[in-house]
Image (cartoon, rainbow, N blue to C red):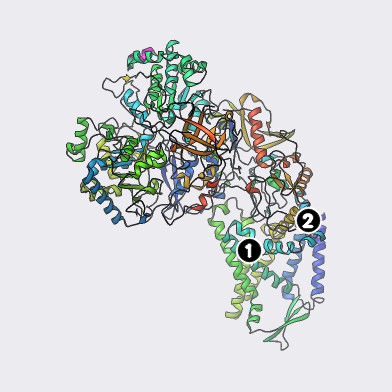
Amino acid sequence: MRPVIAGIVTALVLCAAVYTGSRGLRSFDSALVPYAVASVFLAFGIAYRYTVWISSPGARRLFRKGWGAALSWRNLRRAPTALPRMIATYLGFQKFLGARSRARWAAHQLLFWGCLLAAAITFPLVWGWFTFTSDTGAGPTYTMNVWGFGVLRFDALSILGWLLFHGLDIAAVLVIAGATYFLVRRMRDREASTGQRFGYDFVPLLALIVISVTGLLLTFSSTLLHGGGYEFLAVLHMAAVVLTLLYLPFGKFFHIVQRPAAVGMQLFKYTGAGQVQPCRVCGEPIDTAEYVDNLRATMRDLDLRFDAMALTCPRCKRLQRGQAYRTEVKRGF
Amino acid sequence: MTIPLDPTITPPGTSRFRDAGGVPADRWRAVRGEETLVATHCCFCGVQCGMYLRVHDGKVFGVEPRDHDINRMRLCPKGLNAYQQVNHPDRLTAPLLRRSRTDDLRPVSWEQALDHAADQIQRVQAAYGRDAFGMLGGASLFSEKTYLVGKFARVALRTRHVDYNGRLCMVSAAGANKLSFGIDRAANPFADILLTDCLLIAGSNVGECFPVMTQYLWGARDRGATLIVVDPRETSIARTADIHVALRPGTDSAFFSSVLHVVVTEGLADEAYVAAHATGWEEVRQAAAEYPPERAAQICGIPAAQITEVARMFATAPKAMAWHARGIEHHTQGVENCLTVINLCVATGNLGRPGAGYGTITGQGNGQGGREHGQKSDMLPGGRSISDPVHRAQVARIWGIDEADLPQAGTSMMEMVHQMGRGEIRGLLGICNNPFVSLPNYAVVKAGYDALDFHAQCDFFLSETSANAHLVLPVTTWAEDDGVMANAEARVVRHRKAQEPLPGVRTDTWVMCELARRLGVGDKFAFTGSEQVFEELRVASRGTVNDYYGITYARLDETGGISWPCPTVDHPGTPRLFEDGQTWHADKKIHMQAVRWHPPADPYDDEYPMTLTTGRTVAHFLSGNQTRRLGGLVEQTPRPWVEVHPSHGYASGDPVTVVTRRGAATFPALVTDAIRPDTVFVPYHWPYPVAANELTIDALDPRSKIPEYKVCACRIQPAAHVTAVPAPPVPPGHESYAATQVSRGDQHPPTSSQGRGTSEP
Amino acid sequence: MMGRTIIIDPGRCIGCQACVSACRECDSHRGKSMIHLDYLDAGHSVASMPTVCMHCEDPLAPCAQVCPAEAILVTPDGVVHDADKSRCIGCGNCVNACPMGVPKIDLKAKLQFKCNLCYDRTSYGLAPMCATVCPTGSIFYGTVEELRAERPNVAVASTFDFGGNLLTTGVAMVVPADRGDVPVPGGVGQPAGPTPGPQPFGSVPTSADNVLGEPL
């Protein structure tokens, strides 16, 4: 029940924000209604899925500890730059992906920045938060308005103007490049293809490519074909976007929402009392004391009653098990 | 106070992946569908496991298990990593030359290199006589190449001084086999082990040196067989054996004579079999009677009751089998040791039946095939004797030369080194060996090689020996050429070329043929490839004991390998010998040989009271020139150690110096109950200054001329610090592939003799 | 227990580490070895034991249960997979919750790795790399019937006893045929010394591999 309530509340909040941001729907573009509706469902979905996610013991504890550490006044005072730096390296530049593979890091960066750019442009437009107005009605000088306030005047024929009007095309190119790399990898690389599932692994990539290609074709149609096929392409594009948004909370894309937990995990592990838990057998450090306590509590929540074994390091666990086998089962052949 | 951006703590060992030291030579690749599998065999030990090499775009990049009936898909860590040699950055790709040892080796063209070699050969031979130029081969070469080494020495160099590194490996068993049976090979295939009721393994750390053979041992035990292991160390097979005889090194023949004595006195001998098939039984029985268990127990340092127990277990088993390896062969009485094992098998009638018999486990991939076709100083192709006028005439006719031009028998490998030191041998061509690590008494070996006027060495990695040479010729790995090898069962198996040789690299066959052409006998060496050589080898072995005539490449491709003798192309081969009770002696009898034990060559005294024994570890092979460059194996076992018993008061990791009359070397101690208190063990795969063979004695068995690696007198003493392991040699201006060498600087001994556990620091 | 599964017999293990090298050759994680090989009796004998993922069935995959990122998938065939690369945040919960000591972790990559039963092979009916190459059959892949056809005198057990808490696994251990239906000890013996509590950072000796960044 709680996830549903969270979803409804979030969806209502978004509706209110759209209503307010579009000045009571005055700057709302009715052609974009299906997108706006999809975004409301997306808000519902994400909140619903997020609540389901953090209701499992492991995630719930990390949610509390992570956000607690991130929003802690003490941490902010002690290391004011830690949180922004972590957000930049973990979530923006995704340094950890470089440690997995440089090519994958590069491709993922293309995908990431492409999607981010597209989202930053489209969602405000859809919600009527951004509008472009022209005093003459047909340019070339336009005013960009945010929440109805004019913030920028620019010439549509200038470089800035070109960039503003073609931001989505740039995003599409970035996304196509990144997604194609991953698609090829999924088809060629045995590491990626082991255990891969169509719905989980291929659909997100195909969706991104379809959205980007149809988006580019829309530009192509309007600039070179004088709008030929525009209607059809627009419907196709819209269908792809809407379905992708609805799918987002329930498939691979949900990692976008989950990934910030890495920041919380890191902060909570290393901002405690500065103590480490040594292995109770060999004395080598296992992890910080806060982390081990948290893990043991999680295991108890889950009724995994061997939680005290978390005080033994993995190597000593194996050695003890092997030694017990030798003394109690058989020593030799 | 800073909060670390990167996570800092994991439990010990959890972030170690044994990743072979970063990306291997040809990069990790796991691409679907774009590869071919080349069916071949491993390049390493005498088991000759089948394997597939994975080839993409003309390059070997991986390995895949192969269901060959020798190994049934199983592989050991050496075999699994073997493929990484092929495209390794340390590979030699241009001939290297220097005029004097004070210069650096510099790359030259093949024309220059070969012309220079031919000039030097002719100069040395003109000045000092033909025999002043020697040649040393190896038993990791394909049989075709071992045949060519012998032919090249006798026909192109026309020198009597040719020998091979099997002299350090197989010759004691070969000598004993020849004396007893007139044929030199294991009597039974591996598969017979599964049928036996009692298996005796003498002087072989099967679990480490022949890991894949262990499945036959365990398979026999699953079917109820008992296992007896004779080894001074509690190895992984000895650990669980029914009886582990931890005797003092160098006392094997006393032990086996005593076992035979118990067999006789308890009436367990198969007198009927012996009477029907053997000669010399009376003398053997009398010699064994000199070793009652009480006396042997004293010599061997074991309980007398254990000897009786072994005798009863072996002799009362309906089918018993004995296999041995270097542990009893590397002695000044190596041949005698092997003879006592043969005597035991014969006396109990355990020969020539499924599950009953005798075998020796060859250490090198072609340890069996390499000794058959003429690279041994006293032998000609087909196991012929170079001293036998009939054999000489046969071979002279096959080779199309005058018998008078065929040199006489030469000397053994270690003796040749002594001759180099004395200036009797002035020039040397080495192929497929690394004596600077593998020969005993390093100081003498180095001095001998340093005295050479001209030394050329063929290698695919720059070995410690070739780094000291005047001329280094870059040749192929096993995966870049076709050929055959004969494994420990005398089964001839086919190795297939998986990729073209690297640019600048030539086959050993091409090198020998080109040199022969420059020496004026090109017509005798007009070979374009291995199969042509094999055709000549077949003919040259026709009608001999080691008859390969019925074996062809086509037949090998159709089968999983054929055991010689195989006289005709429709003959199925001979996996098991002596089934009709007949041997290859003229009288068809087994010639039992009386043996009396004598102490090892290096005497014990107050200064050197302990025994040093040497051997292998599972992750490395022979002189280590190959395996010390493979990251996964270096990670498993980065360095040598000295294994000592806790009674000496050391802790694991303490620096301990082992001192013998020939030298001293310092290693970290691996303190373990699994070794006799009076014995220390050092693995021999590493070069000076961490070489076991700085310490070993160059005393030879008078018959087989095998050095006594397995026992010499020593003492141990504490040291200040352990000696660092040198990097594998590479040509000047290069660096050995760093990613594979990360753990080489480790100061700790491994956790166990098989290496470091995967989570060890 | 799964139909065809890995069955481990530490008594046959010769510690050669062929499994370790073979694991590295598995295409689903080529270049990284996931298997553990431990020498159990250092200083006394060469006894050793390989450890692959035991694919816990009851309680089902503790590693997956404690994962805060829903990164560990258990497929209907009982295989507990390695972490989903898009989800794993590298927290190490699975590493320390696993009572068998199986998962490994690459902190820089924020990624867990563990044995996935060579899913690229087993999902096509082939044996995993380690069991394929194991020279001794210490790591066996097949059904219990296939095992007993080769080794008449053995039984298998797939329940472990961790100080009174039972855990049933998909991977089994070989036990003597006459041992009866008794769980295999999981080994939670008392440590030799007093159990240390949390220690200030820096006061604990560390082996080289478990400190990567600067201390707190």
Do the residues marked 1 and 2 share a common chain? yes
The answer to whether residue C87 is above or below residue B396 is below
Horizontal and vertical percent position of residue B572: 33, 32
| Dot 2 crowding, Cα within 10 Å, few <14, some 14–19, many 20+ | some
**In this image, B330 relative to C158: left or right?**
left
N-term-proximal mark, 1 vs 2: 2
Q: Quadrant of residue C58?
A: top right
Q: Nearer the viewer, residue C108 or B71?
A: C108
Note whether residue A287 is visible: yes
Name the quadrant of the N terminus of chain C: top right
Depth check: give the residue in front, A114 or B205. B205
Tag 2's secondary structure? helix
Which residue lies at the image location 60% right of the left edge and 28% below the top edge? Answer: A331
Up-down relation of residue B214 to residue B10 (above or below): above
The percent position of residue C18, horizontal first and vertical second, equals: 52, 40
Query: Local crowd at mark 1 within 10 Å, few (<14), some, or many (≥20)?
Result: some
- Badge 1 marks a residue whose secondary structure is helix
Tell me which segment is drawn in magenta.
B271-275
The residue identified by callout 2 is A51
Answer with the quarter of the image where residue B274 lies. top left
Q: Chain of mark 1?
A: A
Tell me the kind of residue under disc 2: Thr
Residue B721 badge? none
> B399 or C89, which is in the foreground?
B399
Amino acid type, label 1: Ala
Residue under pointer 1? A207
